[in-house]
Image: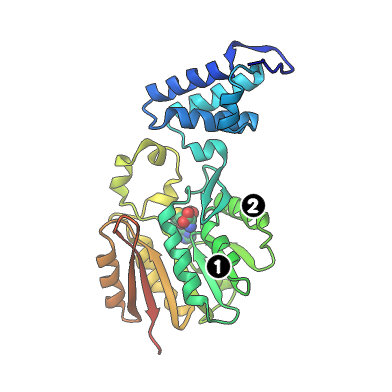
Amino acid sequence: MSRQPVAGMACSATGLGALLKESAARLKAAGIDQPGLEAAWMVEHVLTLSPLMQRVQAEREMTVTQCEQVRGLIARRAAREPLQYLLGTQEFCGRDFRVTPSVLIPRPESALLVDEAVRRCAHIHAPTVVDVGTGSGCLAVSVALALPGARVVALDVSADALVVARANIAQYGLEARLACFHGDLLAPIAEQGWAHQVHVMLSNPPYIADEGVAALQPEVRDFEPRLALAGGRDGMDVHRRLLEQAPAYLKPGGVLLMEVGIGQAGAVCRQAEKHGQFRLSAVLQDQGGIDRVVCFEKKAA
Ligand SMILES: C[S@@+](CC[C@H](N)C(=O)[O-])C[C@H]1O[C@@H](n2cnc3c(N)ncnc32)[C@H](O)[C@@H]1O
């Protein structure tokens, strides 16, 4: 197979195939599960060359800069930095979202929140939807794209997360009907005077017990924002506060959808019952059969 010359100095060690091999070996030694695949994705990121074409062009020579870029990414991944932060993107609900270390990497199970919010709004003309703790904005954007008539608001206490959310909102051209506000839980919509206006409120709050954070895998524990993970002594501080605050902003019959951690659904339901303003409407399970989303309807006054 013919070599494809590239401009710049040749990489000291190697052509593309050898660099892939070296990279995969380094990732394997660091305990990464799919070292060959991840090495190929990082080369794809640097060269804009698909894994298939990488095989075809295995003898291609790399520039020093390209080698350094790939090796830099491999070193960071070997230190267990999540692949998504290195590549700057994560797929969610069939679309790509920009991610940085300021936001949680979207998880597939959170699509349950999107599907349920959309289902609950399907027959409402111009529904108002609020996403509490929006992070990358993946839930708010997915809901807004599925409901072209909806007004959507995305809230987060992290100003850095909202920078990322705004970039995703702009990427999908939603600025006109998806607004971001910075503040603690529902304080921003209190300022907007949104009492009893919300049809559906959805949230994937932090829900790891504070003490459990240390036991998470290094990719999560050392790189994802603690603010997105730690939910207090039992992991349910934000759920409790949302149950307290949400009734003032939901319409009668309005819905509060919250993602919960493993084993938390029962406790969150009991808390809602104690509160008295909600009726439990459903508990949705994820693909692993875990109770993952609790759905409450605000009782009529
Ligand atoms: C688990 S992440 C969810 C991010 C995104 N919604 C998702 O599903 O990928 C929780 C988010 O809630 C935000 N958050 C934590 N405490 C908050 C609070 N008191 N008020 C508003 N947002 C909060 C965090 O900054 C983080 O972005």
Dividing the picture into quadrants, the one containing residue 272 is bottom left
Q: Say above or below: 141 vs 49.
A: below
- Image coords of residue 142 (percent x, y): 55, 61
Q: Is mark 2 within 8 Å of ligand 1?
A: no
Outermost residue toward the bottom in this view = 301
Does the image show residue 79?
A: no
Outermost residue toward the top in this view = 12
- Image coords of residue 4 (percent x, y): 69, 18
Dividing the picture into quadrants, the one containing residue 280 is bottom left
Q: Earlier in the sequence, mark 2 or mark 1?
A: 2
Q: Which mark is residue 220?
A: none
* Residue pictured at 55% horizontal, 43% vertical: 100
- Image coords of residue 287 (percent x, y): 34, 57
Give the position of the C terminus as an image quadrant: bottom left
Quickly name the residue at label 1.
188
Between the residue at mark 2 and the residue at mark 1, the CA separation in whole angstroms equals 20 Å
* Residue pictured at 60% horizontal, 19% vertical: 67
* Residue pictured at 29% horizontal, 40% vertical: 215
Quickly name the residue at label 2.
167
Q: Say above or below: 106 vs 237.
A: above
